[in-house]
Image: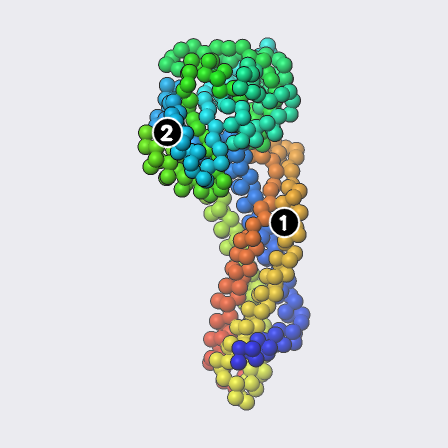
Amino acid sequence: MIRLFLKLAWRNIWRNKRRTLITCSSIMFAVVLAVLLYSVKDGMFEKMIENSVSFFSGSVQIQDSLFFDDRSLDNSFILDSTTKDILVENEEIVSFSTRIESFGLIASDYKTKGAMVIGVDPEQENYITSLKERLIIGSYLNEKDNGVLLGSALAELLSVSANDTIVILGQGFQGASAAGKYPISGIIKLSSPELNRQIIYMPLNLAQDLYGMYDRITTVALKLQHINESENIDNILTAQIPSLNVLNWKEIMPDLDQLIQNEDAENVIFLGILYLLISFGIFGTILMMLHERKFEFGVLNAIGLRNSNLAAIVILENILISLIGSLLGILLSFPVVLYFHINPVRITGDLARVYEDLGFEPVYYFALNADIFINQTLVVLLISIILSFYPAFNLFRLHPVKSMNT
């Protein structure tokens, strides 16, 4: 019976090819628009998280219990062997980097500017942030190096380059003065414009000498196999290391997490309007179909086809039309998304400067996730099924004589 109904539904939708093609086209372009919207939204947010997490903060951080609220070097700690073993034994943790995170006044021969001073183990840090790949001028750091790396925008503001010298002034551990003169080993360019304007890297032992923090650190940054596991790892490590504060990236960067949630809410509203338009298009087709086929339905009912069977055939027709439109939408949108996934759209001009001022990379990235395509198809099919109950309800009340006289 089901096979017969499917065959009848398939034949019926092609009896009026224009109506079917118009409906399929409207669904197709709606799916394409929804897929592109979701793809660019997910792509930009994934890149924002990657830029912030992979290029600096790490997926999870371990700090002294007071350091997050009061970023004083007095709120530092010594990483003991027990804690190291816990991190090494966790299979989700790919690598970790010990750091000193502080601030200082950076002076060149021409200008002075406040900046973040980050002391790192060069080899460990490269595993976390791929810092060596960001080098554009000069040479990378090593453990015995006495030089520093500057963000390219910061170097431009200070009018310095590789092999020049800068002076760092700040406050060290337990109120000690911190001052030092350092050659610039290299210039790095980070994808985050905000970090690029205010960051300096130096070897960890050099930072410990500068701030008088021998064997002490402020932060351990962790790189995970899957960033989505950051909250789970946070909970596990919090239980294993109760004396220290474990933070996932959402806690480290609450503004970014809130921004993503707000944008998700805005996109839900936009997509709601889009799906409402799709619904009107499908519903209009259903009404036109009911009007045009009243005589046909009356005849079929008169010769013995039950109202429930008529309703089932009409529902199948709407589902088939929606499925065709959705599949065409996926086939059309996939190569577009694939192209822009490989070749992201770079923004230029004044708009690019606006994005950079807001701390965003001026690039539109497109995500290539299967669930983006699947979800749009399922939503359109659900809309079609829901709207199909209207003609089904009308067909249950069908009177064959009245229908044939209309």
- Of the two numbered discs 1 and 2 in the rendering, the one whose residue sits closer to the viewer: 2
The residue at the point 49 percent across, 42 percent down is: 226
Above or below, 178 against 383 in this view is above
| Lateral position of residue 14 relative to residue 195, left or right | right
Corner quadrant of residue 176 = top left
Q: Residues within 10 Å of mark 2 (few under 14, many from 20)?
A: few
Q: Residues within 10 Å of mark 1 (few under 14, many from 20)?
A: many
Separation (CA) of disc 1 from disc 2: 47 Å
Residue 367 in view here: yes
Instruction: Point out the tag, 1 or 2, that comes first from the N-terminus.
Output: 2
Q: Which colour assignment does the render follow?
A: rainbow
The amino acid pointed to by label 1 is Val
Above or below, 71 against 58 in this view is above
The quarter of the image holding the C terminus is: bottom right
The residue at the point 34 percent across, 32 percent down is: 241
Residue occupied by mark 1:
337
Q: Which mark is residue 128?
A: none
The residue at the point 57 percent across, 80 percent down is: 4
Corner quadrant of residue 239 = top left
Element type where label 1 sits in the image = helix
The residue at the point 61 percent across, 65 percent down is: 324
| Lateral position of residue 220 relative to residue 40, left or right | left
Question: Where residue 301 sits in the image (x, y, percent)?
Answer: 53, 86
The amino acid pointed to by label 2 is Thr
Above or below, 403 against 47 in this view is below
Residue occupied by mark 2:
82
Residue 359 in view here: no
Q: Nearer the viewer, residue 277 or 168?
A: 168
Question: Where residue 36 sits in the image (x, y, percent)?
Answer: 60, 50
